[in-house]
Image (cartoon, rainbow, N blue to C red):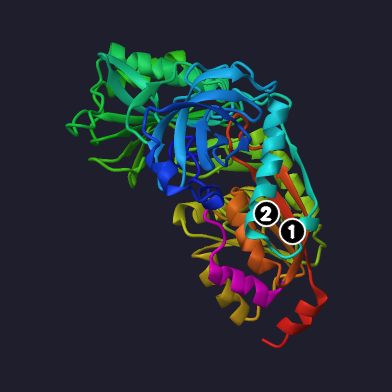
Amino acid sequence: MPQSNHYSHQSRSHNDRRRQQPDEKVQATVNIGQRFPLTIRRLGINGEGIGYYKHVITFVKGALPEEVVVAEVTAVHPRYLEAKIRSIRKPSPDRVDPRDAYAGEVGGFELEHLDYPAQLAFKQDLIRQALEKYRPAGYRHYDVRPTIGMTNPYEYRNKAQFQVRLIDGHVAAGLYKENSHDLVDLPTCSVQMPATMTVMRQVVAWLEELQVPIYDEEHNSGIVKTIVVREAAATGEIQLVFITNTPKLPKKHQLLMKIAEKLPMVVSVMQNINAGKTSLIWGDQTTLLAGKPTITEELDGLVFDLSARAFFQLNPQQTKKLYRLAREALNLAPNETLVDAYSGVGTIGLSLADVAKEVRGMDTIPAAVADANANAQRNQITNAHYEVGEAEVLLPQWLASGFAPDAMVVDPPRTGLDNVLIDAILQSAPEKLVYISCNPSTLAQDLQALTRGYQVDYIQSIDMFPQTARCEAVVRFTKRHKFATHCQSY
């Protein structure tokens, strides 16, 4: 997902790097370009095949377990090798033909050559690998449940965020190759909702037809940098955002006329200005060009107005299942208070407000908090309130003021929970705790501390991003009674 939007790869596992200490003499004899047969033992956290060449761990992009490949070394590191496939001598029975020809070039498709049931098994195994590495208390006895998948593991992404550049004189829109700024044009994308790609490719064709200046990264010239298309699954409304290098958008009137005439599903056209060379996709200034400033999405009977930068889960179908899992895990009673940490636009907390006495949430992004409170008002929810700030700062403040939550749901970023927040959770010791994780490694690491006060009832993984190596999970905890007595002495 773009580099900040789930098309990116996870960092290399330190566990994999250090599993084998290579013999220095062997390492010295390995050169880039060297080829050798290799049996693939398992998949790494990014979906690469893992084998061992003379006891040196070797990562082979695109290789699958049980395959015998001829690997060609592409990088030599002190403790591991990277390689690519030159040929496959023995293919895996789980190997399939990917739908997208560029599946091996950009992120977001890295498991498209692996049969879907095997993808689900891999994601369950990812959690087990992480637990084995960090070894939180009692991990050998955890109930790690099979991954919940999709009936159709394609066409699920509600947002396309593609870079725009000129390639051989033609306007291209797509994603960068891994670890580069070489753009790969994506005329199709099997994991995107079809309407998002229809709008994307039509707009790209109009940019070329109207000769709208396209951004040139090398010279920091041109106008259009990025196109963002988001569809509300429940209503079919689409929002289109042009991210530009300058406030000026040449041929704007002609573009808007074409969009209104040919793409009636586009009800919101925005422009975001992000000047100069920067690794950030979005700038601070967003203006309305046509239509309305938001699109309307629905989830579990709630209505959400999504502005251009508002976060919303990228897989609406699985999001319903995810929140249902969280609801079941919390099992709230009508008189219980809930803290919704890392709340975003309030989707999780608001979906639970009907069974809670009070919901308090927080997020560091002011626009997200404003959206969360607006969404509460829009849905006539009066027992939910959201504040701007870090969970690790606000929760201790709430505790000091006398607020004692009965239940807490945490949905942290890939970096996991802040240590100060973990301390605040352990001190407040809510009776019910649910952790929604998007990174098995940081989840397992956080469990080392959380299991001082809680036992893990189960870990239920769910596939939010089919065809990728991403794995999400819902963890339900039960508070240890001895721990509860201890916390009363704080």
**Residue 459 within the magenta-colored segment of the rendering:** no
For mark 2, what is the residue? Answer: 132
| Residue 146 locus on image (x, y percent) | 77, 40
| Residue 239 locus on image (x, y percent) | 47, 30
Q: Bounds of the magenta span?
A: 414-429
Q: Is residue 360 visible?
A: no
Are the residues at dot 1 and dot 2 in contact (C-beta closer than 8 Å)?
yes
Question: Mark 1 and mark 2: span between their CA atoms?
Answer: 8 Å
Asked whether 109 or 370 is in front, the reply is: 109
Q: Earlier in the sequence, mark 1 or mark 2?
A: 2
- Tag 2: amino acid: Glu
Q: Main secondary structure of the magenta part?
A: helix
- Tell me what residue is drawn at x 29 percent, y 41 percent: 274
Q: Callout 1: 10 Å neighbours few (<14), some, many (20+)?
A: some
Circle number at residue 112: none
Q: Is residue 369 above or below residue 80?
A: below
* Number of marks: 2
For mark 1, what is the residue? Answer: 139
Q: Is residue 104 visible?
A: yes
**Residue 423 within the magenta-colored segment of the rendering:** yes
| Residue 463 locus on image (x, y percent) | 67, 37
Q: Quadrant of the C terminus?
A: bottom right
Asked whether 73 or 187 is in front, the reply is: 73
- Left or right for 185, reference 408: left
Helix, strand or loop status at disc 1: helix
